[in-house]
Every structure is written in structure tokens, then in C-alpha cells.
Image (cartoon, helix red, strand yellow):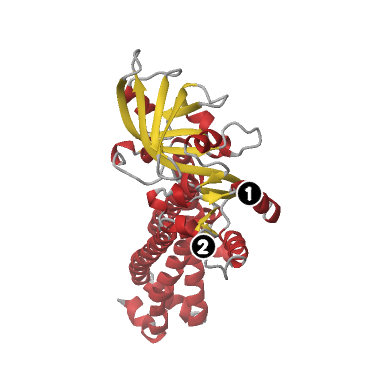
Amino acid sequence: MTWFLAKGLLRDRSRSLFPMIVVVAGVMLTVFFQSWVQGENYELIRSSAAFQTGHVKVTTRAYAEKADELPNDLAIEVVSGLLAELRTEFPQLAWTPRIRFGGLLDVPDSLGETRTQGPVVGLAVDLLSATSPELKLLNIKEAMVRGRLPERPGELIVSDDLATKLGIEPGALVTLFSSTMYGATATANFTMAGTIRFGITALDKGAIIADVADVQAALEMDDAAGEVIGLFRSGEFDGRAADKVAAQFNARYAGSDDKYAPKMATLPEQGGLGQVLQLHGFSLGIVVSVFLFAMSLVLWNAGLMGSLRRYGEFGVRLAIGERKAHLYRSLVAESAIVGAVGSALGTAIGLGAAYWLQAHGIDAGAMMKGSTMMYSQVLRPHVSAACYYVGFIPGLGATVIGAMISGATVFRRQTATLIKELEQ
């Protein structure tokens, strides 16, 4: 029966061509928007986890309340003990300490006097340890522009834009002015090993990255760190697993009133990221719903026009004994065939466009100059498993719904008037 209906559609293009074009266009756009929203989510999670939040993050309770102020006076003390505990209890995550700090980077002249200086946002990570996940996590090797990675204590890397602004080259001596854990002025001399560009506006403006041991010494933070981040070894964020780990850890300190007690937060609980991810999911639902409604409306009208054109055919089929219910089901089956084929073609075209853009990306740096979000300037879709089937929801749904509505005219067809109509 299915093959019989398919041959009928192939021989009579007026019954399938326009609905097919509508389905292909709608499904293609649905699949592309799905991959685009997934790309935004993927990049937001990846960048935020790598540079800011981790998949989970441990700080003191007081630090968490003022995290935007970089309050290193509220940092975790005896961080080595906490790291040992976390690595033992939660081996499915990679744990690493970090210190965030602000300050001035001073560039001296040949006489040791200030030649130029600029404000910086610093990130102290484990750069020199052979087992550190930071080089891979931050993608530092690939992001290097000039010079090399730090190889010994006392070296740091500077964002390429800042280095250009300050007029310094790899090998230059610089002085960092900041504040210690106890509020005193801190100064430390470093050698700039190289420059870096992440493609993230918030970092490329004026970031420096140094080894955590050097910054601990400079800021009088012996065996202390502002935060400890954890990342799943698979590299992918797992919301349920993260919630479970955080709940298990926080339960240990639930009865403590100590503001310096450690507290673990998951990625969506930091910086409003949970609301942003929910908004992306909601926007995707709206896109699918709009295409489903619009395509159903267009295909409903197309079905009504086709029913008028096939009015005589319906009468003849009813006159030779075909039941109305069977005729109605055959119309719905025809639409399902059109929807399935159109959805497959639309999905293929949409995936092709998404894969091409995923490989090449769109440089949106000009639009993101003032952005403070940890978000790459190169926008890319991300093809996930959902992209392979999401187009079939509006593709099949719209065609079947449209056929069910327009096909209801079959039940109003009266065979008693057939001879009179044929005579006319």
C-alpha cells in the first residue's frame, strides 16, 4: 500500500512538489537553528568552564558571596589538604587550584624607571607541573602568538593586545603591582615568556597568566588559593553528576557556621549561567513550535487546495466502494510519506550547512569588542545527536496535522451528487 501511494505521488507532482518544498525548507531551518543554539550552549559551557567556573568550583563561603571582587583575603587556606581530599573522594574529576587577581603591569626603561604601565586581570594556574590539566584546558599552546610557554619560575605570558599596547616583546622584564592576601601592596618581577590570544574579548584586552606558585609567593598566599576547580575527565559537562558531587560535598559542612568553610558550586549556579542555558533551551523550543505552526498552516492550505482539485477523484473512489475512513487514512499516509522524505532531505541540507560552519566559523569580533563574557569571537554551530532527529518533529508533525485537517472534507463528500457533477 505504501509503495502504491508513493508511486502516485511521484506521478502526480502537483500533490507532492509544493508540500515537499515547504517541508524541506522548514526542516532545514529547524536543524540549522538547533545546531546554532547547541553551538552557543557548547561554547558558553566550554569557555566558562575553562576560564571561569570549572564544571564545579570550590571556594570559601565568604569568597563565593564576593567573587566578583576577587577577594583573596577570603581565600582557601591549606589548599593542598583540600586538593588531596577532593582527588581521593571524587577521582572522576580533575582538580586544580587557581588564583584570580588584579593589578598593574609596569614596564621599566633602561634606568629602571616606569616607561609605561597598564591595568591587568591575572589568572594564576599550574603551568609548570607535568600532570597539570591547565595547558590543555586553556588551549594555551594553540593560542600562543609570540614567544614560548613559561618553562621556569618567574615567567608569565601576556595577552598579545596588551603586549602590543605596552610595546614589549618576549624576554622583557616587567613588574606586577597588586595587593597581598592581607591587604598590603605586593610587587614582583617577572619575565614575559610570550604572548597569547584566546579569541575571547574579555581576556584579550589585558590578561596575564602566571604559575600559581609564583603568585602565591608574590601575594603572600602560602598554600592558599582563591578557588579550586574540578572538571570531568571526559571533558563534557554532566549536570546531574555535577549536582550529585556538589550535594555530597556540601553535606559535610551543612552544620557549620564558619564563613571560611568550603562550598562547592556547579557551573549553572555561577554567574547566572543557569538562566542563560535555560533561555537557550526555551528559545529552541520556540523555534521548533513556530516552524511547526507555520508549516502546518501552509500545508493545511495546500491540502485544502489539493482536496478541491481532487474532489472528483474522491467521489469516484467512494462510488466504487472505498470507505471514507480508508480514503482519509490514505490521504494522511500520503502526507506522512511526503513529510518523511522532505524531513530527510531538509535534515541532510541543514546538517551539511551546520558541519561546514562548524569547521570554518563566523568571526564576530567586530560585534563583541565591548563584551565581558567568556565567549569566543568565532561563532560556530555544534552538531549534536538531537540535530539528526529534531527536524522530523515539525517535518512529519506539520504534514500529518495539515493533512488531517484538510482531509476532513472527505467525510462531507456525498456520492449521491457524483452523477450530476460528472454530467456538468
Q: Please tell me how crowded label 2 is: few (under 14), some (14-19), or many (20+) other residues with Cα within 10 Å.
A: many
What is the quadrant of residue 122 in the picture?
top left
Q: Name the residue located 53 percent from the left edge and 56 percent from the top edge.
A: 386
Residue 200 in view (yes/no): no
Q: In this rendering, which labeled residue sits more in front, label 1 or label 2? A: 1
From the viewer's side, name the closer residue of 252 and 47: 252
What is the quadrant of residue 371 in the picture?
top left
Q: As drawn, is 79 to the left or to the right of 411?
A: right
Q: Position of residue 41 (x, y in %)?
A: 45, 52
Q: Please tell me how crowded label 1 is: few (under 14), some (14-19), or many (20+) other residues with Cα within 10 Å.
A: some
| 11 is higher (above) or lower (below) than 166 | below
Q: Position of residue 106 (x, y in %)?
A: 35, 26
Q: Earlier in the sequence, mark 1 or mark 2?
A: 1
In the image, what residue type sits under mark 1?
Answer: Leu
Spatial CA distance of label 1 from label 2 is 59 Å
From the viewer's side, name the closer residue of 419 and 344: 344
Q: Position of residue 241 (x, y in %)?
A: 61, 60
Instruction: Name the element at disc 1.
Output: helix
In the drawing, what numbered circle is on residue 288? none
- Residue underneath mark 2: 337
- Residue underneath mark 1: 83
Q: Name the residue located 36 percent from the left edge and 84 percent from the top edge.
A: 417
Instruction: Name the element at disc 2.
Output: helix
In the image, what residue type sits under mark 2?
Answer: Ile
